[in-house]
Amino acid sequence: MIDRITVQGTLKTLELGDLKRSAQVVLAQTSTTKVKPGAEYIPSPLSGSQIEMTLVQEYGSRELLTARFQLPLASAALGQNYIHGWTENLHGELRLGARLLRFALQKYPYLFEPEQVDRFIQTAEVLSTEWTWHIECSSYRAAKNLLMRVYRQIQVLQAHNSRHDIGVDGYSFEDRNQRGSLKIYLKNGSQMKFYVKVDEMSDRKQRKRRGKALHDEHFADPSIIRDAICTHLRVEAIPGRTQLQERGMSNPGDWTAEGMELVVDEILKLAGFDRPYVNNPRKVDVSDCATPVQNTFALYREGNGLGKLSSSTITRHRTELLALGIDIAIDSSDHQHLSGSIGQQLHYKNRWKAPEPLRRFMMSEKTLPVLEKVLEEKILEGTLAYPPDRRLLIEQERFRAAVPGRTRK
């Protein structure tokens, strides 16, 4: 379920030279040149997939040094993220992710003191995370059609997002070589993403990257997974910092299956996937509604406009008609792109469940105990799947020796 997680925590009070620990990026501007710390990429000891770490200066009553990690959990564990489960192995995934983060803090590229590692763990806060599931369609074309239906619905909702109950703040749609992906930005800072996952396996850049990262034991025959997910639409719910704070889930240790599903339901609701929209309001029977509501609907259906009605009347009648799948805030010509069946089809309760033979390609009850054991062995051995650049280590040692107050270890 957990595809990626971004965590930030405090290490120590900022001292001179701390930000120079990480790679430096020079930004040339019109009149000045600024040097800012860049990201370091730490190979996972399990697969070689990179964990990104950035040192950040946090301002407040005193300046603090914080570390921000972007952990691609599935890729860091297995070398690929094509197949996921749901919450049945949540605690195992979180335990493995915590161990990978502790490894990144302790082993490479910086030797933080144990108290700094402990402080990071105590103050760790999730900035964002990706929770994913697959929707199986009848064919590859059907998956692409579902993606386009979602895209058209989001276009309509975003055009009318001045209404407070429409949570879509914006969207971006990329169509590269007929491989589309849709990203939705919600008003509370959370996001959603949709794409046909098998397209990523066909992408040239992804093929090149996969060849360097994947281990044969986890991906012996790519065609096995490609055939299994070729008709799947990938759905990613990306709760933001604000939503996680409101739900008391800033620390992964507080995550529960029920809490995560509640957050996903909130995201689906904000995106408008909980409403029983109808694409042809003219065919809806409103005879059970009050007479004033019927009159308002008649004006809407005939296209005469609702300008003569007060805003409070429109809001009251709109709420009642929304229960029937009609949104009178949206033009009748655009209503044809809305459908209540989309939300039902995309819900995680209708997710694809990996059959038994494929569970060895995902974090499951079969692989998690093995991964944890291998990770502990590699940490004890002090080995990495992909050794760091020797020249980088020499440069870091020279810097540590040059910084006042630091001694070489």
Image (tube, rainbow, N blue to C red):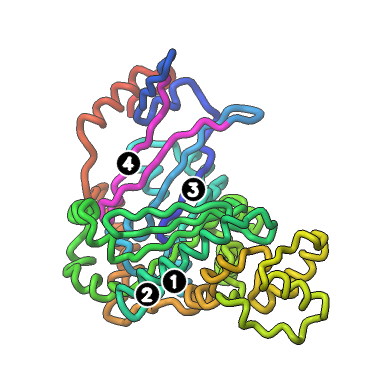
Residue 408 picture location, percent across and down: 33, 25
Left or right of 2 on screen, residue 227: left
Crowding at dot 2, Cα within 10 Å, few <14 / some 14-19 / many 20+, comes out as few
Residue receiving disc 1: 89
Residue receiving disc 2: 365
- Could you say which quadrant of the image residue 314 lies in? bottom right
Q: CA distance from mark 3 to mark 2?
A: 25 Å
Q: Is disc 3 in contact with disc 2, using a CB cutoff of under 8 Å? A: no
Quadrant where the N terminus is found in the figure:
bottom left
Q: Which residues are magenta?
A: 34-58
Q: CA distance from mark 2 to mark 1?
A: 7 Å
The three-letter amino acid code for the residue at tag 1 is Asn
Viewer-side label of 3, 2: 3
Residue 40 picture location, percent across and down: 34, 37
Crowding at dot 3, Cα within 10 Å, few <14 / some 14-19 / many 20+, comes out as many
Q: Is disc 2 in contact with disc 1, using a CB cutoff of under 8 Å? A: yes
Judged from the image, the secondary structure of the residue bearing numbered disc 1 is helix
The three-letter amino acid code for the residue at tag 4 is Tyr
Q: CA distance from mark 4 to mark 2?
A: 29 Å
The three-letter amino acid code for the residue at tag 3 is Val
Q: CA distance from mark 3 to mark 4?
A: 15 Å
| Residue 48 belongs to the span the image colors magenta | yes
Judged from the image, the secondary structure of the residue bearing numbered disc 4 is strand
**Disc with the residue nearer the chain's start (1 vs 3):** 3
Comparing 315 with 215, the one in front is 315
Quadrant where the C terminus is found in the figure:
top left
Residue receiving disc 4: 41
Q: Is disc 1 in contact with disc 3, using a CB cutoff of under 8 Å? A: no
Q: Is residue 388 visible to the viewer in this orientation of the structure?
A: yes
**Disc with the residue nearer the chain's start (4 vs 2):** 4
The three-letter amino acid code for the residue at tag 2 is Glu
